[in-house]
Image (spheres, grey):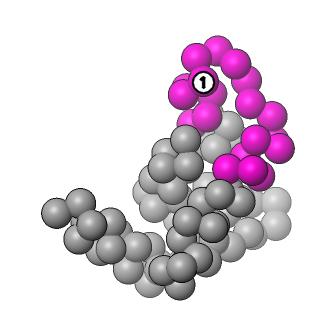
Amino acid sequence: MSDCSLGCLLSRQIVSLSAFMATLYSMRGGEIPGPKTVEVLLHHVRQKVRPHGITIHNRSRQGWYINRADRERLRGQLLSDGA
């Protein structure tokens, strides 16, 4: 699920709580995740990307984002790892 959360962050400029919830809901097959689930997943994603110098930011009352330069760098790293 953390890969799905990372994909969500890479595909949008900012990801709201409702967008994360919708992503998680579709993956859990009917079980509605709580807001704490999103916080825990984001914690794991932050740990995963931190060694690469990537920071996930929080914009109050709007959601979470990775700045453009970091998104592009992370995409490049993911593509080179997948090749």
Residue 12 inside the magenta-drawn segment:
no
Which SS type dominates the magenta stretch?
A: helix
Q: Is residue 42 left or right of residue 79?
A: right
Quadrant for the N terminus, please.
Answer: top right
* Vertical relation: 28 (above or below) 37: above
Q: Residue at horizontal 55%, vertical 65%?
A: 48
Crowd class of label 1 (few under 14; some 14 to 19; many from 20; radius 10 Å):
few
Quarter of the C terminus within the rendering: bottom left
- Where's residue 5, x and y in %? 55, 50
Residue at figure coordinates x 70%, y 19% from the top left? 31
Residue 11, horizontal then vertical, whole percent? 44, 57
Residue stretch rendered in magenta on the structure:
23-41
Which residue is outermost to the left? 83
Tell me the residue at 62%/43% (across/down): 19
The residue tagged 1 is: 28
Residue farthest along the top direction in this orientation: 30
Seen in the image, is 54 located left or right of residue 64? left
Q: Nearer the viewer, residue 30 or 45?
A: 45
26, 12: nearer the viewer: 26
Q: Is residue 32 magenta?
A: yes
| Apparent side of residue 31 relative to residue 52 in the rendered image (left or right) | right
Q: Secondary structure at mark 1?
A: helix
Q: Residue at x 82, y 60 (%)?
A: 61
Residue 52, horizontal then vertical, whole percent: 48, 80
The amino acid on which the numbered mark 1 sits, given as a three-letter code, is Arg
Q: Is residue 77 above or below residue 42?
A: below
Q: Position of residue 37 (x, y in %)?
A: 76, 41
From where the camera sits, is residue 41 visible? yes
Q: Is residue 10 above or below residue 34?
A: below
Q: Count of labels shown?
A: 1
Quarter of the rendering containing residue 18:
top right
Q: Would you say residue 14 is visible in this rendering?
A: no
